[in-house]
């Protein structure tokens, strides 16, 4: 279901380029498409001399692509590819779509790069803690139940191939959760659709994951506001000018439950089986492709304020960290690469 609107509901980012800062003056050659997908909202802003002539065609193609990705990678749809894979305990190769095979390949790659801080097989623990497709229980599971699942977790327990596209679990009970990477992939897919129609200026946002190319209707870089990680109010904590690059944010300040005065985040550390428990509230990452930005942001969020920041700095990742200090206030920490890009005239392909 698509509607041509100017403003969307936001998550993790504030799309300044959609409102006053990209202000459309007399007859701007631009249009917006927005709707709902993957349990969240999306907005696509298109700019170009003939953009308006293709609005209906692009809206239809984008709608179809998002519906297909959801059918492939959703853990909430009973008949999605991912759900059917998770229901099976077969140890032989299972045919999947090229898209699912490719996303799992990238997920396994990033899992290896980050020491399993990002892991697509974390699904059993996510479900156990009540943050999956099943209704939330708002209670912490017994330690023995967490330990029992350990043998089902780990990207090394899974194989993928692109030709022909297929997945194979190496241990019974291995299940997939691609929620930390699928939205980023979907952003890249939409970018491919727009570029196939020779669109030179666009901004895409799905649930807080963003990719921008070219300039806005005023001929300027797209300005993206990164949300401050506060629970009781929404506000912009940082602004970046994004051009030919992607921005993804991972945070734990909206989705959690409290038991006996203790707060349990929806982000599960795949290395321990427990929700993250540290002072890092959110991480924003700039990469060329949104699929990588999405997964890397999740990995850094799992690592925490010290390990994550050191990892990002050592690997020259452009990342912004929001850390809760001893006074109960949030402080921003930028990696050198993020500071360099922020200091430039516009954040470009890193």
Image (cartoon, grey):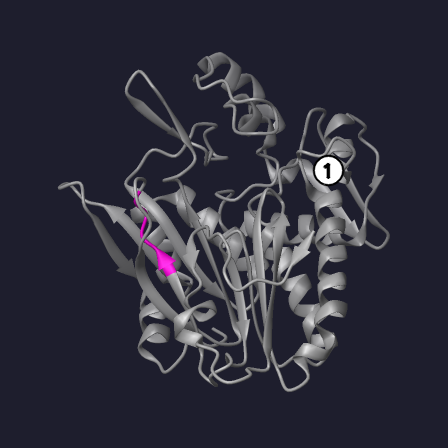
Q: What percent of the width, then of the height, locates residue 268?
A: 47, 33
The foreground one among 152 and 21 is 21
Quadrant position of residue 86: top right
For the point 66% across and 35% down, the residue is 75
Taking the magenta stretch, the answer to whether it contains residue 229 is yes
Is residue 333 among what the camera can see? yes
Q: What percent of the width, then of the height, locates residue 166?
A: 81, 45
- Residue range of the region highlighted in magenta in the rendering: 226-230
For the point 38% across and 63% down, the residue is 225
Within 10 Å of the Cα at label 1, are there few (<14), some (14-19), or many (20+) other Cα atoms? Answer: many
| As drawn, 201 above or below 157 | below
| As drawn, 176 above or below 145 | below
The foreground one among 326 and 132 is 132
For the point 40% across and 39% down, the residue is 254
Q: What percent of the width, then of the height, locates residue 28?
A: 55, 82
| As drawn, 146 above or below 163 | above
Which residue is tagged 1?
82
Left or right, residue 254 beside residue 191: left
User: Mainly helix, strand or loop, the magenta region?
Assistant: loop
| As drawn, 105 above or below 151 | below
Describe the element under mark 1 as helix, strand or loop.
Answer: helix
For the point 63% across and 45% down, the residue is 38
């Amino acid at each position: 279901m698509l509607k041509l609107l100017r403003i969307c509901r936001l998550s993790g980012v504030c799309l300044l380029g959609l409102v006053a800062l990209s202000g459309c003056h007399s007859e701007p050659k631009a249009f917006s498409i927005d709707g709902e997908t993957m349990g969240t909202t999306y907005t696509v802003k298109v700019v170009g001399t003939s953009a308006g002539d293709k609005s209906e065609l692009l809206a239809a193609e984008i709608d179809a692509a998002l519906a297909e990705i959801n059918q492939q990678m959703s853990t909430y749809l009973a008949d999605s590819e991912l759900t059917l894979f998770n229901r099976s305990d077969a140890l032989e190769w299972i045919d999947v779509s090229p898209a699912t095979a490719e996303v799992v390949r990238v997920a396994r790659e990033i899992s290896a790069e980050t020491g399993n801080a990002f892991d697509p097989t974390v699904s059993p623990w996510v479900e156990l803690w009540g943050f999956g497709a099943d209704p939330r229980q708002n209670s912490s599971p017994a330690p023995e139940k967490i330990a029992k699942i350990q043998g089902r977790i780990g990207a090394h327990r899974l194989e993928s191939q692109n030709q022909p596209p297929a997945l194979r679990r190496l241990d019974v009970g291995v299940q997939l959760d691609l929620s930390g990477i699928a939205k980023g992939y979907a952003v890249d897919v939409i970018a491919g659709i727009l570029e196939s129609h020779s669109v030179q200026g666009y901004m895409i946002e799905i649930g807080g994951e963003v990719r921008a190319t070219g300039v806005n209707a005023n001929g300027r870089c797209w300005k993206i506001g990164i949300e401050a990680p506060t629970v009781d109010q929404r506000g912009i904590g940082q602004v970046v000018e994004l051009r030919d690059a992607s921005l993804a944010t991972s945070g734990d300040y909206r989705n959690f439950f409290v038991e006996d005065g203790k707060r349990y985040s929806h982000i599960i550390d795949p290395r321990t089986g427990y929700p993250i428990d540290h002072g890092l509230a959110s991480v924003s990452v700039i990469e060329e492709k949104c699929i990588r930005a999405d997964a890397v942001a999740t990995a850094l969020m799992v690592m925490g304020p010290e390990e994550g920041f050191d990892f990002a700095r050592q690997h020259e990742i452009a990342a912004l960290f929001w850390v809760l200090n001893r006074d109960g206030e949030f402080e921003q920490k930028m990696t050198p690469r993020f500071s360099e890009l922020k200091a430039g005239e516009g954040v470009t392909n890193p």
